[in-house]
Image (cartoon, rainbow, N blue to C red):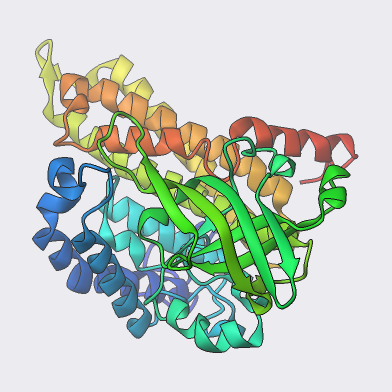
Amino acid sequence: MTTTDQNGQAPGEPSWPTAMSQDERLVVDGLLEFTRQAVVPVEDELAPLLHDPRQGFDEAGRESPRIDEARRAVRTAAADAGYYAMFCPPEIGGGGLGARLAFLCWEQLHLRYGPGERLVYNTISHWASGPSAVWTKTSARVASEVRPAVVAGRLQGCFGMSEPDAGSDAWRMKTRAERRGDTWVLNGAKQWTSFSPHADYVLAFAVTDPALVEARKGGISCFYVPTATRGFAVESVIRMFGEIGGREGILSLQDVVVPHDQLVGEPGRGFDLAMLGATQGRLYNIARSVGLSRWALEQTASYAKQRWAGGSPISEHQAIQFMLADMATEIYAARTMGLDCAARAQAGQDVRREAAMTKVFATNAAFQVFDRAIQVHGAMGLTNELRLHEGWKTTRAIRIADGTDETLRRTIARELLKGNLDF
């Protein structure tokens, strides 16, 4: 563990906002040591399944149950060690740690382990598939019977918002929930639902007041639906980038009956629940963009010093130097923006605008970083061995996940045109 002085800085480390405090460093170092000891050996054992699609997916595109079992084991071990729910609200059994430390943990995990399917990324709960602030809004029964297993990592969920005709415009949602006595009956379909093929439950959003939805003033509610409920099905797995399997699914809800106390939050206020996780999800994508970018820069700088062309290492060629300089410049800007945004969120500020600006910049910067990294590596950059293509695919995908560039730019512009010009 790195030695620090009384101000929380490592010897010779400058005291500025991007540096880690002593307490932050202890948590990050502890998390990284936990992954090294408890998770990496499991990854090594399952390497053929994790890294060879022919073994990791079946003919229907679903992942091997052994991978799902391994993820569950990692989640529960991380929960026992105090890491899995450390950023979740204390009222649901979480650690209540802040957004800045969450950013640092996600960044450092991705910096150390890089792109690809890694079990280490299951050591911290994801807002859409694990415990989060949404779980403060459940009924007493669900909180008592279900929530402890979610917080302990034994149950993994998914977030059923997007639909075939309702992606960026959720007001076009067609899934309906009808109240019948003490139950609700859900009918509809969901699409692009991450983690759904092996999920234990879905937080399903449905229209409960069509008039309010038509006026775009509410009317969408959220329900806790175990995936074993009659009428629920994962119709198919969505394959992307030419892959033979996937982790996103198309869901069907046909006369799915749930008790009234599986309504999450207030009727018609589902968007409020979705917003509880939106900023957290964007900060997560910003942090992993920065971490992956730093990983790519390290690989590229090292390779440039080893690879020769024209009688000298390519690191001595100005064209390569300029690409490395641009990569570093954009990473520095993205990281500084991300930490500032996380600090504002931790201070209780409404950072929807800042999170939108930072996600647009950081994810686009990361995509460019990987594109340059591949270019510097030449043909080697295209090989599976170096994993740069995995980072390229990931950073391309997260320019769409949790808000597309265009949707976020609209959010930014709307705030600016309201006169909110201070940031």
Q: Quadrant of residue 405?
A: top right
The answer to whether one can see residue 356 in this image is yes
Question: What residue lies at 50% left-to-right and 75% top-to-bottom?
Answer: 7
Q: Nearer the viewer, residue 283 or 62?
A: 62
Disc count in the image?
0
Query: Which residue lies at the image location 13% right of the left edge and 14% below the top edge?
Result: 309
Q: State the residue in front, 417 or 272.
A: 272
Q: Nearer the viewer, residue 50 or 302?
A: 50
Residue 10 left/right relative to 140: left
Residue at 57%, 62% in the rendered image: 256
Instruction: Choose top left, top right, bottom left or bottom right for residue 343.
Output: bottom right
Percent across and percent down for residue 114 are 28, 48
Instruction: Residue 6: give x, y in percent of width and height.
Output: 46, 80
Above or below 381: residue 237: below
Give percent across and percent down for residue 141.
60, 87
- Along the line of sight, the residue nearer the viewer: 300 or 85: 85
**Quadrant (top left, top right, bottom left, bottom right) of the N terminus:** bottom left
Q: Residue at 69% of width from left, 44% of height from top? A: 173
In-image side of 185 versus 240 (left or right):
right
Residue 345 visible to an observer of this rendering? no
List x then y, in percent, for residue 246.
33, 43
Q: Quadrant of residue 310?
A: top left
Q: Considering only vertical position in the picture, is 78 above or below 316?
A: below
Q: Is residue 240 above or below residue 314?
A: below
Above or below: residue 346 compared with residue 282: below
